[in-house]
Amino acid sequence: MIPWKQLDSTDIPNDGGQLHLYQRDDEFSIRIDNCELMNSRAHGSEEKLAELGCAGLGKTEQPRVLVGGLGMGFTAAAALLQLGVNAHLEVAELLPAVVRWNREYLGHLAGHPLRDQRTLIREIDVAAIIKTSTQLFDAILLDVDNGPDGLTQKENDWLYSIAGLNAAYRALKPGGVLAVWSAGSSAAFTGRLRKAGYRVREEQTRARGKGKGGRHTIWLANRC
């Protein structure tokens, strides 16, 4: 078997460990220490996040969508497929190295979404954008860490707290949707969404699509 080769690594802020990029033949892996966060052969649920979160926005004249977490670019690319030519897709990625990896190593995997003229990449915590936005987005797609109950970075707790969900509610236009990816389900998080005033639907999807791979959860929470 072809061995994995480490291409690069970067420090995660606030002593969060190190993030590593590996390649084996045409397969790529992003890991935190020894834990794999994402693999280029398992991106079906990331694409489903964008498909469900942006459903119906193709008919919106100038939709504005925020993606939290660039990863390998699959969520951003899938969102662009759902949106028209006048859409604005804002992608927030905290780690500059992840943006660089997409430009240097990973862009071809998802069809180079960062090259699309509709895409604006911002090297910033998505929480900072959410906190300072009011009725700005038609959809917010969160693919940050492992979801509300599977965190590797405690700094991300705020996004999934009542305070974070309330801020996302304010950042959405009326009728807008907050779509959240998670490695697993969480009744507690569903309850927090409802407490924040959202209409909530929970979907189960597979990591590799077509019924294959691990089972992941997507919440679709609409602002009333």
Image: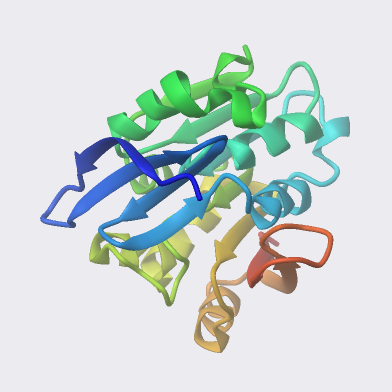
Q: Which residue is painted at 60% across and 23% down in the image?
A: 108
- Nearest the eye: 22 or 9: 22
Query: Residue 64's spot in the image, x, y percent?
Result: 64, 32
Q: Position of residue 101 (x, y in %)?
A: 39, 28
Q: Residue furthest front?
A: 1
Residue depicted at 56% across the width and 74% down the height: 193
The image shows residue 78, relative to residue 53, as above or below, that is: above
Specify whether 215 is left or right of 39. Answer: right
Q: Residue furthest left?
A: 15
* Residue 188 x %, y %: 50, 86
Q: Nearer the viewer, residue 137 or 190?
A: 190
Q: Is 103 placed above or below 190 here?
A: above
Q: Is residue 134 visible?
A: no
Query: What residue is rendered at 20% in x and 48% in y?
Result: 12
Can the viewer see residue 84 in this picture? yes
107 relative position to 33: left or right: right
Q: Is residue 135 above or below residue 175?
A: above
Above or below, 34 against 108 in this view is below
Q: Residue placed at 51% from the left, 21% from the top?
A: 120
How many dots with numbers?
0
Q: Nearer the viewer, residue 169 or 55?
A: 55
186 relative to 200 in the view: left or right = left
Residue found at the very far bottom of the displayed protein = 187
